[in-house]
């Protein structure tokens, strides 16, 4: 049984020097972080992603700027706007996801539960539906 993606709010500490937010494995992020990457300087009208995973969970945060994320777990389809460094989108393996409408200053940070493995990616939508289409989901 898989769980549904969710938005987590990260607390910030602020004073006259600025703000600081903390993200830690198994605390704010509900998994062990094994890989970190970020997407930036994305060209206008470019969509990224177009995949799901067999086992990788991810946390997405727009540390600068904004972007949109389309999610599809075969039961629900929704669009999430990432527009704050305090808003973290937790993606489950069963989330087909596409990122788009990146602002010029967008830096999208991605924290992943697994090291990169090309065999973990489901890049064909029909295969994604055959893997996850008949599953029942626990909604958080």
Image (spheres, rainbow, N blue to C red):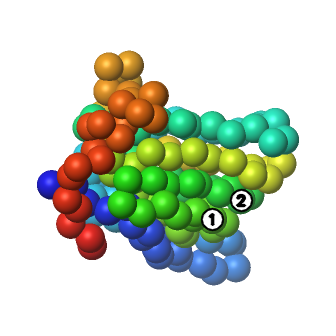
* Element assignment for label 2: loop
Q: Considering only vertical position in the picture, is 118 above or below 131?
A: above
Quarter of the image for residue 63 reads bottom right
Q: Of all residues shown, which one is farthest toward the left? A: 1
- Of circles 1 and 2, which is in front? 1
Residue under the point 70% across and 79% down: 16
Q: Of all residues shown, which one is farthest toward the top? A: 118
Q: In this orientation, does residue 35 appear?
A: no
Q: Nearer the viewer, residue 65 or 134?
A: 134
Q: Which residue is mark 1?
A: 81
> In the image, residue 87 lies at what x, y percent?
53, 68
Residue under the point 63% across and 65% down: 81
> In the image, residue 93 lies at what x, y percent?
32, 44
What separation in Å lies between label 1 and label 2 (alpha carbons)?
Answer: 7 Å
Q: In this orientation, does residue 7 appear?
A: yes
Q: Is residue 7 left or right of residue 63?
A: left
Q: Is residue 63 left or right of residue 137?
A: right
> In the image, residue 139 lies at what x, y percent?
26, 70
What is the number of the mark on residue 66? 2
Q: Considering only vertical position in the picture, is 39 above or below 109?
A: above
Q: Considering only vertical position in the picture, is 89 above or below 86?
A: above
Residue under the point 60% across and 78% down: 14
Quarter of the image for residue 3 reads bottom left
Picture quarter with the C terminus: bottom left
Q: Of all residues shown, which one is farthest toward the bottom? A: 15
* Element assignment for label 1: strand
Q: Is residue 135 left or right of residue 84?
A: left
Which of disc 2 and disc 1 is earlier in sequence?
2
Question: Are discs 1 and 2 less than 8 Å apart at CB?
Answer: yes
Residue under the point 36% across and 37% down: 128
């Amino acid at each position: 049984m898989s769980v549904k993606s969710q938005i987590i709010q990260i607390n910030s500490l602020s004073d006259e020097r600025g703000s600081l937010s903390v993200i830690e494995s198994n605390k704010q992020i509900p998994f062990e972080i094994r890989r970190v990457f970020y997407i930036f300087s994305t060209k206008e009208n470019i969509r990224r992603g177009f995949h799901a995973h067999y086992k990788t969970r991810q946390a997405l945060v727009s540390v600068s700027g904004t972007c949109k994320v389309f999610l599809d777990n075969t039961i629900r389809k929704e669009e999430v706007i990432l527009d704050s460094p305090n808003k973290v989108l937790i993606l489950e393996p069963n989330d087909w996801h596409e990122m788009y409408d990146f602002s010029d200053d967008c830096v999208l940070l991605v924290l992943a539960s697994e090291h990169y493995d090309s065999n973990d990616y489901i890049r064909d939508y029909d295969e994604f539906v055959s893997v996850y289409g008949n599953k029942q989901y626990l909604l958080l």
